[in-house]
Image (spheres, rainbow, N blue to C red):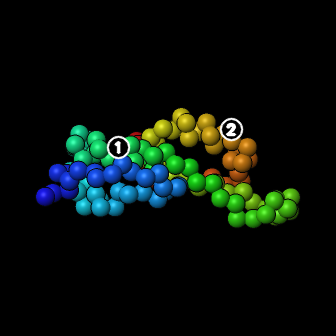
Amino acid sequence: MGLSQRQVEQPFEEPSGLEHNLAPYFPELSSFGNSAEMEASALYARLKPEVDRVMDTVIQEEFSDSSERKHPEYMRAVAWNIERGNKLEGILEVLEGHPDLCDADVRGVCAARWRA
């Protein structure tokens, strides 16, 4: 029985952060020719709630204690996977308005796609 024919036996548990139950489906998901073909599949329709949960997860970590933030050599860095600009308006809103992110000295983005 192929992966697309396999029924999800139990509803997905709510793992924390970026943990997920999608790994068994990676081989079949990667076999689609493009994103549109994958998104049109029955498999993706079943997995979409879990995919959306993972893609909408924000992880924020502190690597220094708050007393170090007052040090003149303190630097605040933000890294964000912007997923090719999907939900760009919301990402920019958070980067510009969140009190822990808006004053960052360095902003790094990955998965950015520049178009001519």
**Circle on res. 48:** 1
Q: Secondary structure at mark 1?
A: helix
Given residues 12 and 105, the one toward you in this image is: 12
Residue shown at 52%/49% (left/top)? 57
Residue shown at 58%/54% (left/top)? 59
Given residues 8 and 111, the one toward you in this image is: 8
Amino acid carrying mark 1 in the image: Lys
Q: Secondary structure at mark 2?
A: helix
Q: Is residue 110 visible?
A: no
Amino acid carrying mark 2 in the image: Gly
Q: CA distance from mark 2 to mark 1?
A: 29 Å
> How packed is label 2: few (under 14 Cα within 10 Å), some, or many (20 or more)?
few
The x and y percentages for residue 70 are: 86, 58
The x and y percentages for residue 8 are: 28, 51
Which residue was labeled with disc 2?
Answer: 97
Work out which quarter of the rendered image holds the N terminus and state it: bottom left
Residue shown at 28%/57% (left/top)? 25
Work out which quarter of the rendered image holds the C terminus and state it: top left
Counting residues from the N terminus, which is met first, the one under dot 2 or under dot 1?
1
Q: Is residue 19 above or below residue 49?
A: below
Q: Is residue 29 left or right of residue 21?
A: left
The x and y percentages for residue 28 are: 22, 57
Residue shown at 72%/48% (left/top)? 100
Q: Is residue 60 above or below residue 98?
A: below
